[in-house]
Structure formats: C-alpha cells, structure tokens
Image: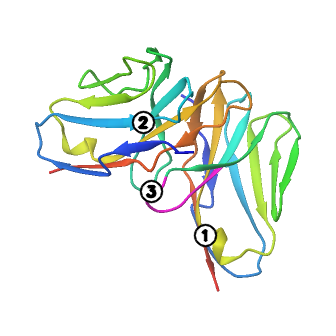
Amino acid sequence: TQLLEQSPQFLSIQEGENLTVYCNSSSVFSSLQWYRQEPGEGPVLLVTVVTGGEVKKLKRLTFQFGDARKDSSLHITAAQPGDTGLYLCAGASGTYKYIFGTGTRLKVLA
Amino acid sequence: GAGVSQTPSNKVTEKGKYVELRCDPISGHTALYWYRQSLGQGPEFLIYFQGTGAADDSGLPNDRFFAVRPEGSVSTLKIQRTERGDSAVYLCASSIYVGQENEQFFGPGTRLTVL
C-alpha cells in the first residue's frame, strides 16, 4: 500500500514567519501535486511537479520534488493569514490515480 | 463557468438506510473521481470514471458502495445499508484529461452523517 506521510500535522505560526511542510513516502511517484483546502470546500490545486529535483515557485510558495521522486516539500516565505488552511500532497500512482497525504493544518496568526 | 457541484451539501441518515450522492462535473470533463475524506485526513480514492465506464473502482470499501455515470456527465454515488463508519465528506472531482499534468477540480463535497 502506498502511503504519503506529511509533517508536521499541525502548525501555528505568526504572520511573517517562514515554514516548511514535508511529504514523504517509500514509493516512487510519476508526479506529485500540492493542494490547499479550506473548511467546507474541496481541495484546490497549487502545483504539479513531475521531474525529480524539480523546483517550482508560486509567489511566496516554493515546491520541491525529491531527486528520487519519493518526497516533496513546500516552503512558504513570510506567511500571511490568507495562507491558513489544510495543505495536502498527492502522489500520482500511474496516469490517473492519486494517493493523498495525511495533511498539514496551517494557521497563520495576524 | 460553473465549477463542480455536489448535492446535497449535507445528508443525515439513519443506520441501515440507502443514500444517493450526486456530482455534476465541469462540462466537457471526461474524467470523474469520487473520494472520501474523514475528519482530519486527506481524501481517499474511491472510484474513477473515464466517460461512462468505471475505469477503476478499486477504492470502493465494499459492495455496499456503487457509483454510476450513465451519460458520461453526472455521476451518482450510492451507498446501501449505511453504517456509522460511512460518515465522512464525500468529494467529487473532474478533469479534462489524465496524465502527468492532470488538474482535478473538486466540488465542495457532501457531508454524510449516519446516526
């Protein structure tokens, strides 16, 4: 069974701080996605990384795919209250099936 | 344009009853997914449709769960003889194609509570 473990599970920080969320597995994925989910809504895709070692930036968010395509990280610079939410990684198993991680719940305090 | 919609938004039922959850995908999206999300967890894959056919139903927990997509658009997830353990948010997602850059668009979910 493929599993994606995310750490930390919960994170509460002050506005302006930096943070990193990790997504780890013993399995290799063909691609990996990061989503953010807010209460009462479905997850919204932030980024897809495909190549081992790939780094993508989305404003203050930096995503990295591990060289072996088994792990990924999300770094947020100068967090803002609007970044609050549940962050989920999802690894592609084949061309269509996605295994979601356990989630990291982030709260950014003003 | 309209996103993925799901009805009802909330469903409360009693143990042993039958429920149907509906998903309206984005028009033109051929791929449709159902997931189940328990409190504090990430979504768990249930079933994937490509067009009208269920290409992969390996995530359905048991034979009480069934899903259809008869015309390749709207899908219904059906749960028979509901159990308290079925309580969760059921999410539907659609995408225009599959592949490495596949972007799934999720609906807001149906919160199912089995008493």
Determine whether B93 is above or below A23 in the image.
above
Report the residue at 70% width, 76% height from top: A80
Determine whether A85 is above or below B114 in the image.
below
Quadrant for the N terminus of chain B, please.
top right
Q: How is the image coloured?
A: rainbow
Q: Along the horizontal axis of the image, is B58 left or right of A110?
A: left
- The residue carrying mark 2 is B24
Report the residue at 23% width, 25% height from top: B64
Callout 2 secondary element = strand
Q: Along the horizontal axis of the image, is A72 left or right of B38?
A: right
- The residue carrying mark 3 is B40
Q: Residues within 10 Å of mark 2 (few under 14, many from 20)?
A: many
Q: Amino acid at mark 2?
A: Asp
Residue A84 is tagged as 1
Q: Amino acid at mark 3?
A: Gly
Q: Along the horizontal axis of the image, is A107 left or right of B25?
A: right
Q: Which residues are magenta?
A: A35-41
